[in-house]
Amino acid sequence: MAKADIANCIRKLRFEHGEMTQKELAERVGCTRQTIVVLEHGRFVPSLALAFRIARVFSRTLEEVFQFEGEQPSG
């Protein structure tokens, strides 16, 4: 199965929302700060529920926060 690449603009949105810290965002969406770190670096694809919670914190749609970058061929 191919791995999907999902980009996001979480870091930018945090700073646009009063320089929200990773910890503050994590607390608001119910995950750990480390989860926010790996999301921002593109090393983790969130669950659909977590993606919705993050988008709602910023009053954005899923597509405004997360961008589908296509699929990588499986090897």
Image: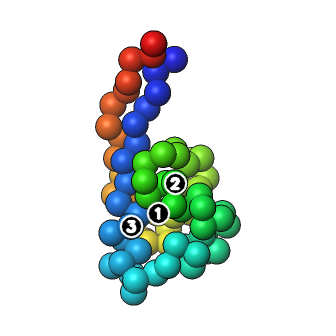
Question: For the residue marked with disc 3, what is the amino acid?
Answer: Arg
Q: CA distance from mark 3 to mark 1?
A: 12 Å
Q: How many marks?
A: 3
Q: CA distance from mark 2 to mark 3?
A: 11 Å
Task: Characterize the local packing of mark 3: few (<14), some (14-19) or many (20 or more) Cα atoms within 10 angstroms.
Answer: some
Could you tell me which quadrant the C terminus lies in?
A: top left
Question: For the residue marked with disc 1, what is the amino acid?
Answer: Ala
Q: Which residue is mark 2?
A: 38
Q: Residue at 48% x, 45% y: name it.
A: 43
Which corner quadrant of the image does residue 62 belong to?
bottom left
Q: Residue at 46% x, 63% y: name it.
A: 55
Q: Which residue is mark 3?
A: 11
Q: Residue 50 versus residue 56: which sits nearer the camera?
A: 50
Are circles 2 and 3 on residues that touch, CB within 8 Å? no
Residue 56 place in picture, x, y as percent: 50, 67
Callout 3: SS: helix
Q: Which label lies toward us, 3 or 1? A: 3
Q: Earlier in the sequence, mark 1 or mark 2?
A: 2
Is residue 36 rendered to the left or right of residue 17? right
Question: For the residue marked with disc 2, what is the amino acid?
Answer: Val
Q: Residue 7 versus residue 62: which sits nearer the camera?
A: 7
Task: Characterize the local packing of mark 1: few (<14), some (14-19) or many (20 or more) Cα atoms within 10 angstroms.
Answer: some
